[in-house]
Amino acid sequence: TVVGGYQATLDVEHVFERCPNVAAVVRGEGEEIVQQLVQGVPFEAIRGLSYRRDGRVVHNENQVLPDLAHIAYPDRSLRKHEYCWTQGGVRLSHLTFDTVLTTRGCPFKCKFCTFSLNPLGQKREYTERPVESVIEELKTVTADVVLFSDDNLFTNPARAERLCDLILQNGIRKTFVVQARIDVARQRRLLDKAWQAGFRVFLLGVESPHDRILGQLQKGITQQQIRDACAILTQYDFYLHGYFIYGNIGETEEEMLYIPKFAREIGLDSISFQKLRLEKFSPLKEVVEATPGYYYERIGGPVYSDRYGRAELKRIRDRIRSEFYRVPQLLRIAGKAHRLGLVNGRDAAGMLLKLPFIVYGLAQSRAQKKKKRRAVDVPRPVQGTQSQATV
């Protein structure tokens, strides 16, 4: 068995310890490595591969980052199943889904993020696929909804406009979902073309409503700029989803609980929010370790403080959720999703009929996650100077 991906790359030794049947781990970007494996190249000759030999784990040297323009896109005809929207193991929509990647890397330097690095911590320069190659791949996609999984598809506005133009010229009719910075609001012509080309869902990295926190995270935007951008974006009928981070260094409970109010003020349709996390190679590591009262239990896990531990942040998370997702907001979400064709009446009726199974599936999923967390040995927290945090 050969495995790979982001998590496997971050913790190779853990994979080998916990999974005795795994023979090798592909580290980092795996397209070229997998080709070599299929071609029968010996393990010891493949850069970027870790593998078992004579009872020990061998780590080959890192691979040279491949040129994105030369990486073949997937042959979707080999799939046995379609991708669809599920919750608790129950299908919720008649629509099918797929993903397409057109760029790698990110030119921005947000402090909480490692998108500008590959999973090995190597600098991943922002690189683009030829737009014509993206169009050829889209022609092979049969799914109704396509997520562009780029960290920010609109990094190069001229290229994004060209992509929209070619989608229209080639008669490609899909519903597109895209991740973006709010800066895209400055590009009105691009927004017009994106709407015409079928872009309907924008996943926006807002992160915080507070200038102090935005500066701390090196987000490169201010609260007023977020407000101005959303004032433009809400002039279209895009579905706007905002990402937020809570539990930032020095952030008070009052500041965290402003997230749902701010999200409603700027017109977001839905939000998701996660605790501040310390990713491997993140520059936040030094900040946390130098800040009294703050600590983390493991790389990749949340940051806690003496004031806001696991229980306190969970309580705050639940309040953020309940404050935002009130009945009027849920009705707004349902109405816009129906208007944009993301769900229809038949889907809604099906959801009601399947509700007991959905709830059961969610409960089972949560129970399994708790069981997995208990099974992991948690090391003593790494604390900031003079921290009084205890395990």
Image (cartoon, grey):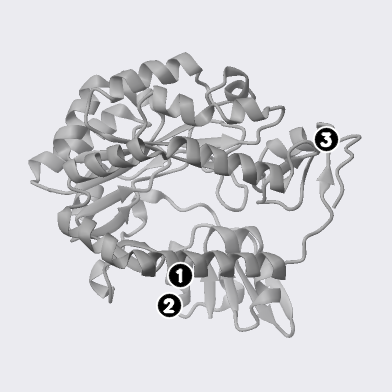
Question: Of residues 124 and 61, which is closer to you in this image?
Answer: 124
Sequence-wise, the earlier of marks 2 and 3 is: 2
Q: Give the structural element (helix, strand or loop) at label 2.
A: helix
C-beta proximity under 8 Å, tags 2 and 3: no
- Circle 3 packing at 10 Å, graded few (<14), some (14-19), many (20+), is many
Tell me the tag on residue 34.
1
Q: 11 above or below 101?
A: below
Q: Which residue is mark 2?
A: 38
Label 3, label 1: how far apart the Cα atoms are: 45 Å
Residue 277 visible to the viewer: no
Write down the quadrant of residue 373 in the picture. bottom right
Q: Please state the horizontal and vertical placement of residue 302, each as a whole percent of the image.
A: 67, 46
Q: Which residue is mark 3?
A: 293
User: Which mark is nearer the camera, 3 or 1?
Assistant: 3
Kind of residue indicated by mark 1: Val
C-beta proximity under 8 Å, tags 2 and 1: yes
Q: 28 above or below 197?
A: below
Write down the quadrant of residue 194 in the picture. top left
Q: Give the structural element (helix, strand or loop) at label 3.
A: loop
Label 2, label 3: how far apart the Cα atoms are: 50 Å
Q: Please state the horizontal and vertical placement of residue 32, each as a whole percent of the image.
A: 44, 63
Residue 179 shown left or right of residue 109 in the figure: left
Question: Of residues 52 and 377, which is closer to you in this image?
Answer: 377
Residue 228 shown left or right of residue 174 in the figure: right
Q: Please state the horizontal and vertical placement of residue 210, each as a whole percent of the image.
A: 57, 21
